[in-house]
Image (tube, rainbow, N blue to C red):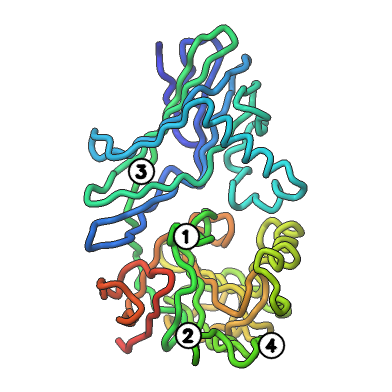
Amino acid sequence: MRVALCWPLLLCVPSAVGAQSLEIRTAPSARVYLNEVNRGAGVVDFVVQNVAIVNRGAQRLTLQSVRYEALRRDQVILAQYFPRDLLESIWRFLRGYLDRPGNMTSQASTFLFDSVLTGGVVLAQTTSLESNSAVMLPRRPFVTSMVVPERLRISATAVNDAGSETSASTELALVRHTSPNEYLLPMEGRWYVASSASLQSHHRWRPSSEFALDLTQIGAGGSSYRGAGTSVSDYYAYGSDVLAVAAGRVVAVTADVADNELPKPNEARADFARRVLTPLWERDPTGKLANGNIVVIQHAGGEHSSYAHLRRGSVRVRVGDSVSAGQPIAQIGFSGDGFEPHLHFQITRGPDPHFSPGLPVSFVNIRPIGFSSTIDQEPRRALLTGEFVETVRR
């Protein structure tokens, strides 16, 4: 049996089973970034965001297995194996979710359909793949310690109706990202990391925001707001200056979106999300409504910083402006997708904040606050959900 080898978003070499062609596509790219969870213990994690198993041949193929293998040199460090019955169960659940009205549209930037469903390929109903149909396996997390893998091999097998087998495989590079830029925290003072690249974070499961941060302030009594928190001005973060994290050029600005409504008293987050936030994505799957007011700045090396949910009327820059590191560009507001005023910040490889790959980020002008952080007090590391950091003068 000959094995069909393929690379992301390219056609596989056909196997020996006639005109059949099993293909593996990945998105957003052929590179997966490692996230340093605990430097002392050598723990890293990574997420394979989207894998599509595609039948490009004329005959129906029934998917039999998919295997992920993380390798260092030629040694398998860890693996995940999905036999046919498990694949069928996973795909039945996901296909049902995507069949709900509006979900294919609202989840376009999560599953990156425009990247993996090219060339007339459509989503299959089951793991029996008709010609030009695909099954997707999104959001596969991996955690390893001490021995860090260098690449990930993904393999798939399928059989035709006569029982003849065909296979395909592809490899993704697993890399530690080194930015060409030194970044400053986008605010001054002491800030709470409400969400980061943790596997528990909602950010980690969307390719563009995989390493994004939600930053807010905590005041007296451990709360993010004064009094009852019924007005946006009650929130400590609201109106704080947002600073450019590095020198660059402004490439996108939205400045006229009004503040969103706050959750009603005692309203569950899930209910608020269904009532207010989900419709933002359904009306505009590009994420522009969810951004609210936003500034995007291009930096050296093709990296872009995004600052979202800004206060209407506070944006001080225009497209084409050059900015310096630490320059005030806007204020924190409550526009777009969020439960309360905060700054959503991320670095991406590309200007589109929802369809460009997210990049790990660290800052050169902060120090962790001991009572909230781990024993690792190194400032230039990935920030952890739930810790406080503060800026220092350089």
The answer to whether marks 1 and 4 mark residues whose Cβ atoms lie closer than 8 Å is no
Mark 3, Cα crowd under 10 Å, few <14 / some 14-19 / many 20+, is some
Mark 1, Cα crowd under 10 Å, few <14 / some 14-19 / many 20+, is few
Q: Measure the C-alpha gap from mark 3 to mark 2.
A: 36 Å
**Image quadrant assignment for residue 120:** top right
- Residue visible at 43% across and 48% down in the picture: 141
Residue 327 circle label: 2
Q: Seen in the image, is 112 located left or right of residue 213?
A: right
Q: Earlier in the sequence, mark 1 or mark 4?
A: 1
Q: Earlier in the sequence, mark 2 or mark 1?
A: 1
Reading the image, the residue beneath label 3 is: 173
- Let me know if residue 145 appears in the view: yes
The image shows residue 88, relative to residue 219, as above or below, that is above
- Let me know if residue 256 appears in the view: no
Reading the image, the residue beneath label 4 is: 231
Q: Earlier in the sequence, mark 3 or mark 2?
A: 3
Q: Position of residue 7 (x, y in %)?
A: 44, 33
Mark 2, Cα crowd under 10 Å, few <14 / some 14-19 / many 20+, is some
Reading the image, the residue beneath label 1 is: 200
